[in-house]
Image: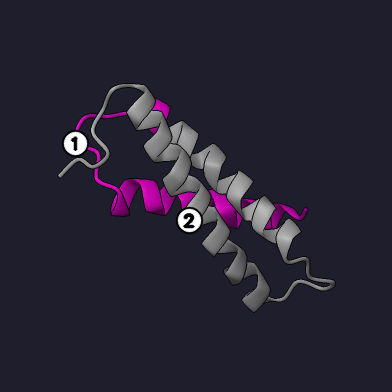
Amino acid sequence: MYLPIFLLWVLASWVLIIFWLPDPPPDWVGRIAGLIGGVAGGFLFNMAWPVEHMTGVDAAATVVGAFIGAGTLFSVARMAMGGKMSGR
């Protein structure tokens, strides 16, 4: 795994958690779980569809896995902590 791809997954997860999944009170446990889920999702997406030489398009495709992983683990962490699924 390359450091730029890892940072891309972290950035994509952070954008999803902060800007797309609203969270009125600060919920750091959910946010950290979302970051971990994003990295795990990007890694698993890369393992499911391996690429010999990663290009920009291939790296962007792994962001789909990061979004899915971040959203899933963020929601599971919020439910485990007794919070609502959405802040709306």
Residue topped by disc 2:
67
Residue 15 is at least partly visible in this image: yes
Left or right: residue 21 versus residue 73 is: left
Q: Nearer the viewer, residue 41 or 16?
A: 41
Few, some or many residues within 10 Å of mark 1 (<14, 14–19, 20+): few
Q: Is residue 77 left or right of residue 6?
A: left
Identify the element where label 1 is drawn.
loop
The quarter in which the C terminus is drawn is: top left
Q: Is residue 28 visible?
A: no
Residue placed most toward the observer, 27 or 41: 41
Nearest to the eye among marks 1 and 2: give it. 2
Above or below 36: residue 51? below
Q: Residues within 10 Å of mark 2 (few under 14, many from 20)?
A: many
Residue type beneath disc 1: Pro
Amino acid identity at mark 2? Phe
The magenta-colored residue range is 1-30
